[in-house]
Amino acid sequence: MAAKRTEPVTIISLRELNLGTPEPQPKESKTFTVEDAVETIGSGCFHVALFLIVGSTGVAEAMEIMLIAVVPPVIRCEWQLENWQVALVTTMVFFGYMVFSILFGLLADRYGRWKILLISFLWGAHFSLLTSFSPSYIWFVFLRTMVGCGVSGHAQGLIRKTEFLPTKYRGYMLPLSQVFWLAGSLLVIGLASVVIPTIGWRWLIRITSIPGVVLTVAFMVTKLMGSLLASPPAGPVALLPHRYLSHVHLSPYFIPESARFNVSTGNTQAALVTLERIAKMNRSVLLEGKLVEPILEKRGRFTDLLDAKYLWTTLQIWVVWLGIYFAYYGVILASAELLERDLVCGSRLELEVVVTVGVSEESQSPCHCQVFAPSDYQTMIISTIGEIARSHECIISGSLVSFLICLCCVCHFCIYSPY
């Protein structure tokens, strides 16, 4: 009887608990990452401006690097250099580029891509100008090595462009950036054909440093304007009408700091401001919620590339890029060497060269000191146009038009070359 009386009491008490009002659960706040915001904002006016402005770094880099194809013939004659001395110039430029590209990459991850880009512009332009005043060969090699170190930081512009591009546009927007390298290469060869015969190679180097100077000033001015507009205007700036300040306010849109870097360093407010400006310029809407950094179990390391999971892919990429750069710079430098030496001169007349004591036989060769003729510059321009094939679009999309253009350029160089 006791058991029968306790059972209904238990049921009633459970029913009372079930009929009670449940306690309200706290709502989870919405969050999003920089990658989510970039994909949602999409492409627009901001990406066009970023493509043009950051792409101009490729013009400056190409002009500085491609000087090694047009200046050595002149300094060979001026300083009576031997083959290994001329080759050392190219070697040291790329050695500095290789070492400092690694260093600048590490510094950019720690201090920001904007600062490294500014340093690389200032560094490259500074040492490029100094190169034009080189009193000797040793100074020339040292200063051009410093230029190679400086321009290696220009690659941070391409990285920033990648970080702000939606995934579906990266496949053709990034290869399209090679157009700026092509423009810089053609520009420096065209300038060399006019400047070197008239006012000399030193003025050519000074002219090619102008893009680096312009980029340095542009970055510093936009940073200054951004700082003025971040705080209430004071002094003479406060006297300017608001409509003028509103136009100046657009300048930070074009050269922003990496939002991913700001988030990784804990400065989410700056990253959020950047993303809001991009969304406003693209006439889009930013995601609602809190901007957070994606949770990673562990950060990537260089040794991960050699892991069994990625080793085969890593080796393939290394071999492909080794072949691309070996062939590209090999053809460019070999073309310049052939044009400089004019191999036909050895077969025109079998000249007897009298070797002077204390002077190398190489320096007395009839082919030792040969500067470029106008037709040589034209040949270099035609062969440089073949850089259209350097764009990965030719490989990815199998563009028949690009392939035919490249094939025609190569055939023209082979047929009409005097060798």
Image: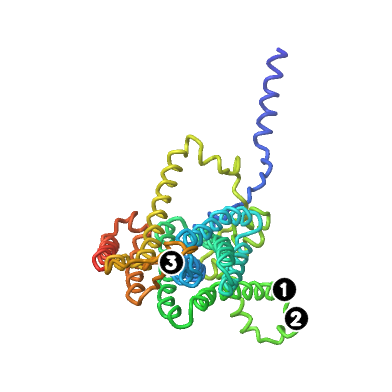
**In the rendered structure, which amino acid carries the disc numbered 3?**
Ala
Identify the residue at horizontal 48%, vertical 82% (top origin): 199
As drawn, is 338 to the left or to the right of 23? left
Q: CA distance from mark 2 to mark 3?
A: 51 Å
Q: Nearer the viewer, residue 214 or 129?
A: 129
As drawn, the residue found furthest toward the top would be 1
Query: Which residue does the numbered mark 2 point to in the structure image?
Result: 234
Query: Which residue does the numbered mark 3 point to in the structure image?
Result: 69
Q: Secondary structure at mark 3?
A: helix
Instruction: Kindly identify which numbered label has been placed on residue 209.
Output: none
Q: CA distance from mark 1 to mark 2?
A: 9 Å
- Look at the numbered discs 2 and 3 and tell me whether their residues touch, using CB distance below 8 Å: no
Quarter containing the N terminus: top right
- Judged by depth in the image, the label closer to the viewer, 1 or 3, is 3
Q: Position of residue 197 (x, y in %)?
A: 43, 80
Query: Which residue does the numbered mark 1 point to in the structure image?
Result: 231
